[in-house]
Amino acid sequence: MDLSGRYSYSPLLRWNPQVEEYFIRAYGADHFSRISKALTRPSCYSCIRVNTLKTTTDDVIQKLLAIIQNSGSSEADVASSVKGRLQNGTISESQIPGLEYVVFVKGSGPHTIDYGYEPDKPPKEVIVSRKCAEAVLRGAQVYVPGVMACSSHVEKGDVVAVSVAVEQPTLDGGWGLGITRGTVLQGSQTDPYYFERSGLYIGQGTAMMSRAGIFRASEGIAVDMHNRIFQLPSFYDVLEGEIFLQNLPSIVTAHALDPQKGERILDMCAAPGGKTTAIASLLRDEGEVVAVDRSHNKVMDIQKLAAEMGLKCITTYKLDALKAVRRKNESNDEPNMCNSKDNNYITSQTSDSMKLHKEVPSIAAEGLNGDKSCKEKGRTCGECGMAQEEINALVVGLRIQKVLVLTALIESFLMLPVLLLD
Ligand SMILES: C[S@@+](CC[C@H](N)C(=O)[O-])C[C@H]1O[C@@H](n2cnc3c(N)ncnc32)[C@H](O)[C@@H]1O
């Protein structure tokens, strides 16, 4: 193997043969090969949603430009400051009609990185998880939980080459990483994923902790990435509450839902609250967004984001959406199920009694039949007896669920998909 080529970023997608054949027929071989290549790269721009309840697009652009101009100028400063993160970006307002509250910051790449490879002296290395690598390719630093393995004798301040270990097929037919967190790398072919990681190096950084520190700490930056294959700005801690970094398809989702002031909208897999807060902003904080997530901590994340953005119309619930809806004639044995005389309500079936655990009123399963009369203003549905506003909540909830499915697919294509070496 040519070891100088090993320290590069040249991933190849391997498709299920049937899927590949289908796409080649649909797109033609050339087009499909370009699509496959593009899927191994991050988006070439970052997308920011401006919180128009707090500020304006122009103001955000001005502030970002000012941050660039006023940041420190010493080399160390540049590496860690916003200037360092933004200087390669071009900031522009979205030209998409209706999305004037979106700002694009252009990135650059792929860049060639000299990892200082010498035949007898491999560079010190850090292996990160795929999720961590996806974030790094979008401008993030390497945080402690993302580190899977590290060379021996890495000390704070050492320069390290960062590569990604992508999940591989397991013997039981599933997929797995197969690296024990904390593994020591020797820089030799006996290292885990040595061959698989060839061509999967995403940049070079400075270790912010020693090897022992990285695996002892529970949070914090493990590697400050100063030399990246793709340079996209990080907006961590920048203009908090005024902007939110969000993929364009997610922003479009909320836009397509067309929330109107006073509406009640249900978001059933809501954390961390990107679309929830986008919807609440479009409502101008007038109405209600019922934001549901099955994880307690993630519900707290939604609350934190809503508070940061100054949004008050968001109500959060810890709730498993899959177990949430029960039909009128189903039996109700569980003590914590809420069931009124007229309607079955969405309610969490988890048995704990966390603070967040409360019934979501007024959203009934019967709305699923989509009776058009239910949607007419001021009407009560003859079939299920629900007031119009209650049905609206569910209908809108269904609308968003449909769009969310689509978005999830688009988003997954925008992220680094499962990469396998050919
Ligand atoms: C990709 S995230 C959603 C992103 C979010 N819509 C946004 O725009 O910020 C998926 C979320 O769905 C939640 N989730 C998955 N299954 C769920 C279920 N059955 N009920 C409620 N939440 C669920 C997960 O906990 C996770 O927080």
Image (cartoon, rainbow, N blue to C red):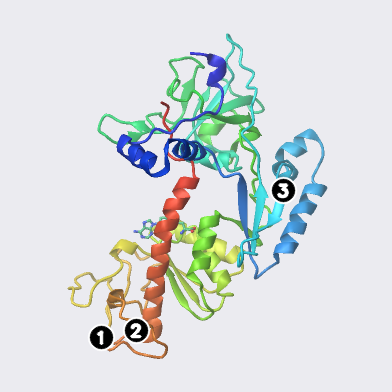
Label 1 or label 3, whichever comes before in sequence order: 3
| Ligand 1 visible in quadrant | bottom left
- Split into 4 quadrants, where in the image is the C terminus? top left
Q: Which mark is residue 383?
A: 1
Q: Nearer the viewer, residue 49 or 414?
A: 414
- Labelled pair 2, 3 in contact (Cβ < 8 Å): no
Q: Which mark is residue 41?
A: none
Q: Secondary structure at mark 1?
A: loop
Q: CA distance from mark 1 to mark 3?
A: 56 Å
Q: Position of residue 85 (x, y in %)?
A: 69, 43
246 vs 19, left or right, is right
Of circles 1 and 3, which is in front? Answer: 3
Q: Position of residue 105 (x, y in %)?
A: 67, 50
19 vs 190, left or right, is left
Q: Is residue 109 above or below residue 191?
A: below
Q: Secondary structure at mark 2?
A: helix
Circle 2 sits on which residue? 374
User: Residue 269 occupies which quadrant of the picture?
Assistant: bottom left
User: Label 1 is placed on what type of residue?
Assistant: Glu
Label 2 or label 3, whichever comes before in sequence order: 3
Q: Nearer the viewer, residue 222 or 322?
A: 322
- Labelled pair 2, 1 in contact (Cβ < 8 Å): yes
User: Label 2 is placed on what type of residue?
Assistant: Cys
Circle 3 sits on which residue? 90
- Neighbor class of circle 2 (other Cα within 10 Å; few <14, some 14-19, many 20+) is many
